[in-house]
Structures are given as structure tokens and as C-alpha cells.
Amino acid sequence: QVQLVESGGGLVQAGGSLRLSCAASGRTFSSYAMGWCRQAPGKEREFVAAISWSAGTTYYADSVKGRFTISRDNSKNTVYLQMNSLKPEDTAVYYCAARTEGAIVVLPADYDYWGRGTQVTVSS
């Protein structure tokens, strides 16, 4: 069983930055692919970014490419999402997700474990 706990959300003005963190339990965290997804009110959960188990490969949704950066520290069982140049349309609950196989996936349904989410609100 894997437990994921997100932190770092909050209220920020457009153009600002936030860094989300996701702390994971489990001895095999370093073998998991990790991802971030988000869900805005009235919308489906959508993929944001993913990182392979070794951090050698990352992948981003077009809407965040060039503004967000995903990274991980396997020694701390933690994955991060650095969000810069935030826009009001980035407002959503952000979820950390883990996939027990190490390959990156971009469909939320393909992740095996989820955190409870952290709210990010970007004001205009």
C-alpha cells in the first residue's frame, strides 16, 4: 500500500509561483513512476506532468509546458511540482499519483494510487 500526501497549495496572484510537494510512504517509491493531475470545478481530472522512476524522463501537458517542472528526490520519497507564471486557468485541486510500474503514463486512470489533493487558486 502506498500513501501520498500533498502540500504546498494556496492562493497566489497571476504570474506568481508555487511549489507543490508530495510525500510518499513505502519502501519501493524509487521504482514508481509519479505524476501530478488536477481537477477544476465541473471538469474532469486531467494530466499535468509525470516523471519516470529514475527521473530520467519527464512529460508535460501542453497547457503547462515551459511553466511547470516536475522533479523527485528518491532519498526523501518526495516528488515536487514547481509552478511558475501561474494563470487563473491553473486553478484546481492538484493530486499526486503513483504508478507501480516505472513507465510514465498520461491517463489519470492508469495511476494506481492517489493523494487527497491540495487546492491551488490563482487570482487575476
Image (cartoon, rainbow, N blue to C red):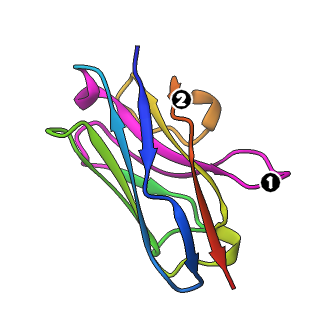
For label 1, count other residues whose C-alpha is less than 10 Å away and answer few (under 14), some (14-19) or many (20+): few
Residue bearing mark 1: 41
Q: Is residue 50 on the magenta stretch?
A: yes
Residue 71: image quadrant is: bottom left
Q: Which residue is found at the position 51% from the left and 34% from the top?
A: 115
Query: Which residue is the site of mark 2?
Result: 111
Which of the two residues, 71 or 120, is positioned nearer the viewer here? 120
- Residue closest to the far front: 11
Q: Give the position of the C terminus as an image quadrant.
A: bottom right
Q: Position of residue 101 (x, y in %)?
A: 38, 23
Instruction: Give the mark nearest the N terminus, 1 or 2.
Output: 1
> Residue 47 appears at what percent x and percent y?
60, 49
Depth order, front residue of 7/84: 7
Task: Give the residues drawn in magenta, as a range.
Answer: 28-57
- Of residues 16 and 43, which is closer to you in this image? 16
At mark 2, the secondary structure is loop
